[in-house]
Image (cartoon, rainbow, N blue to C red):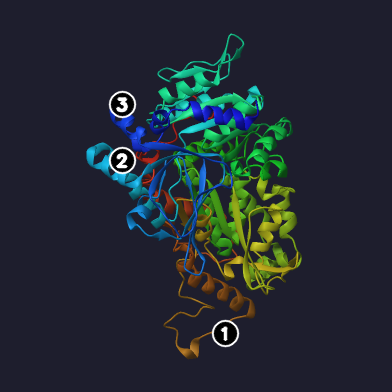
Amino acid sequence: MAVRQINEALVEMDDKYLLLKRHPCSEGLSHDVLRKIADKCDVVRLEPGEFLHRSNEKFTAVFLLIHGRIRQTIADIQGNTLLQKHQTAGSQIGALACAISEPTPMELIAEEPTTLLRLDYQVGIRLTKENEGFRQNFAKMIADNVLNIILKDRRHLKPTLVPVFHQSPATRPLTPRMILRLRELGENPHIFTDQPDWQSIVDVPEFHLIRDGGHVPLEEIRHQAAMWSNSKRTFFDVGTSQDLARMDLLFEVGQKVLWCVTPENWRESLPRLKAMIQRTPGWRDKVNVVWLLPGDCRFAPLAPEMEQLSRRNFKLSFEEPPANQSRELVNGFERIIHQLRGIRIGVALGGGAARGMAHLGVLKVLEQNGIIIDMIAGTSVGAMTGILYASGMEPDYNVDCFVRDLEPGWLFRHLPNGGYWYLLYKYRRKQFDPMLRKYLNDSRLEQLTIPVRSVTVDLVSGTAVVRAEGDSVHAITESINLPVLSIPINRDGKSLVDGGIVNNVPADLLATSGCNIVIAASVTANLEQRFASNCPGTPTSKMKSASIMNTILRTYVVQNVNMNSVGVAPADFVIQPDVTGFDITEFVRAKEMATIGAETTLREIPKLRKLLATVDKQLYGSDKEHPFTSNGEH
């Protein structure tokens, strides 16, 4: 039987009552109430590209989205798009539009196979009057829709149905680790598994998909899923060798898909994943590739084919890192937990030349206190420290490298303003590229453990350029390329210079990239009131003239300070180490500045955790550190 025929048969079997039980509006309602509501609903099944509602038609019904995804577009009277967003499983569509009782400039199109329950609006109003629980659930759904619009979708989906596909047994330990971690956070996950040697976990309901050497019938699986409809989290733990019909069904009902591979077998998994995405291109947005890497690995394989088939990827390891390598691969596991819990933490690192060494102390203390970063955006030295950290370099080791690599030679140490001339020398002799390549090799941003955005400016177009992929070293050298000290870097029709000219603390990039908590680290919030030995009270007759080099770099600092308030505005939390006592060329004092960054951040940790607890109280509601060791044991 064809895949579509099988799925249509399943929908026909799927009773409206069981579908309704999967939706949040059914929470806490009795069997009889659910039966009564379900009896008034109709099942609506849409294939990709089919309309649920056309613009300027009148809404007369409310739709409860059971699974799938609907693209919602609202336009003004000229047809210009005012809002475009996606509605996913668990949401309702149409309640406010029905209340307005006028034609609505809203277009609703299915982007993947989608199942909804249609409830006539007037019938729904009557049912809410008859049942207080249903009324409260319905009101909450409407409030959630409005809140999502106000917060610009910074609240993320917490998927209840999560298929986890494994290309080989090597990645199988991931699922029990996720279950144990989620149980520590107060969840009660359920598990469907095709693993014959699955080790039962106390108090975790399980259902085996293989019985007597064969697959359990789909109808029995559907019935068990209905029995577990009140579960807030259900995993399907299966191999990628599933027959296409079963795999198709899991992609359809799953809200997030984890596709688990290793450097040795990822190519083998491509045909299956391609088949799914070709079946329904919209499914790409729910696919998350999980790379299980060796503990000493700093760069994941370059896999553009996999990137094209997925929305996001995670890199993690279950092994201890070697010396001088951070725990970011181990922390990759917690990033998956963040994804499941609907949280994404971004850190924006601002420019400020050598003063940006304080960022390394900020990053170190965040990690030590269990605040795992999901994304980094950096400008200038913020891009440099951020990319090196995302590559797996341990912060203290990074500091040592900066001190060693950027110590001026004997001549520069004895010249007046030698630090400035040393920077000019490094730029004009193009020495930053080979210096950084010692640590980053020819890696690309896509291969780093943490997703990174770097900011540079194109003098040809006069606009900011954001790098999210490409050569890691180029992403740094473009962003730190100070005008006058260095000539613009010409690449691909662009002339690139330091990103601090237009966006010195790129918190906005994180907010628009899906981070619902944005932390900004700025080293340019304060400006020392001194220039060329001149202070505000210095008499005119005693003021000293500044050199051209001093003037250029002071102008850079003043610009950064004035751009600071613009950059940090979208941030939810700002960390501002006071490093005004350091010259912007004093990389040799990196340890001191990193210490100030660490001490400043440590003082802010209680307030930061309090903020994070508003998004996820279970994750951040206490001062306890991450409860798992590297091997996943308590």
Q: Which residue lies furthest to the bottom in this view?
A: 541
Image quadrant assignment for residue 378: bottom right
For mark 3, does the 10 Å Cα neighbourhood hold few (<14), some (14 to 19), or many (20 or more) residues? few
- In the rendered image, which residue does mark 1 sit on? 545
Percent x, y of residue 172: 59, 24
Left or right position of 513 against 202: right
For mark 1, does the 10 Å Cα neighbourhood hold few (<14), some (14 to 19), or many (20 or more) residues? few
The secondary element bearing badge 1 is classed as loop
- In the rendered image, which residue does mark 3 sit on? 31
State the CA–CA distance, disc 1 to disc 2. Answer: 71 Å
Q: Which residue lies furthest to the top in this view?
A: 212
**Quadrant placement of the C terminus:** top left
Residue at 66% x, 50% y is 445
Foreground disc of the pair 3, 1: 3
Q: In this view, does 51 lie above or below 332?
A: below
Q: What residue type is labelled 2?
A: Asn
Residue at 57% x, 19% y is 194
Q: Earlier in the sequence, mark 2 or mark 3?
A: 3
Mark identifier at residue 137 = 2
Left or right position of 304 against 252: right
Percent x, y of residue 270: 71, 35
Q: Is residue 451 above or below residue 211?
A: below
Left or right position of 43 against 429: left
